[in-house]
Image (cartoon, rainbow, N blue to C red):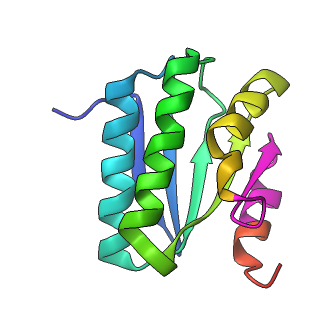
Amino acid sequence: MRDERIWVEPVGSVIVARVRGKPTAEMLRECERRVLELAQETQHVRLLYDALELEAPEIEVVRLQQELEAARQTNLGSASLRTAILVPNTRIAYLARIAFGHVGEAKYRVFYNDFGAALKWLDDLGS
């Protein structure tokens, strides 16, 4: 049975992963499994995390996201995903930077409530 707090689907050439509520380790693992599955099936290289309805996770969950991100880079190799993270506030943005910051700012970026800017950045692979 799929967790209804997680929604991961391709939208055009972007994989959109939406997580609602307070994330757990199981939720993150399931979300990551679906993202990897879609990335391999579709060959998409753009990922948008919609965290607008996300509640602040425990730091252990943030650290788990770091591990999952590192494992994804190993699994996908040179086809690593350019990742935009859509956040509602500075607390979630701070936690997102901890979770994704180790991959380098060329591969991820945090956006405050600006879906259009996130998509534009994802589409601009030259930057």
Q: How many marks?
A: 0
Q: Is residue 25 left or right of residue 53?
A: left
Q: For the point 62% across and 38% down, which residue is it?
A: 99
Give the residue at x 83% y 59%: 117
The foreground one among 47 and 11 is 47
- Which quadrant would residue 54 be assigned to in this image? top right
Magenta segment includes 3: no
Q: Is residue 3 left or right of residue 55?
A: left
Q: Position of residue 34 (x, y in %)?
A: 32, 52
Q: Is residue 123 above or below residue 110?
A: below
Q: Residue at x 80, y 47 (%)?
A: 111
x and y, in percent, of residue 29 in the image: 34, 38
Eyeballing the image, is 89 above or below 74? above
95 in relation to 114, above or below? above
Say which residue appears at 49% left-offset and 78% top-offset. 79
- Residue 44 visible to the viewer: no
Q: Position of residue 8 (x, y in %)?
A: 41, 50
Which of the image's four quarters has the N terminus? top left
> Considering depth in this image, is 105 or 44 the residue closer to the camera?
105
The answer, for residue 5, to whether it is visible in the render is yes
Question: Residue 38: x percent and y percent?
Answer: 34, 65
Residue farthest toward the left in the current orientation of the protein: 1
- Quarter in which the C terminus is drawn: bottom right
Q: Measured along the vertical axis of the image, is residue 24 above or below residue 45? A: above
Depth check: give the residue in front, 30 or 65: 65
Q: Is residue 105 magenta?
A: yes
**Magenta stretch?**
104-119
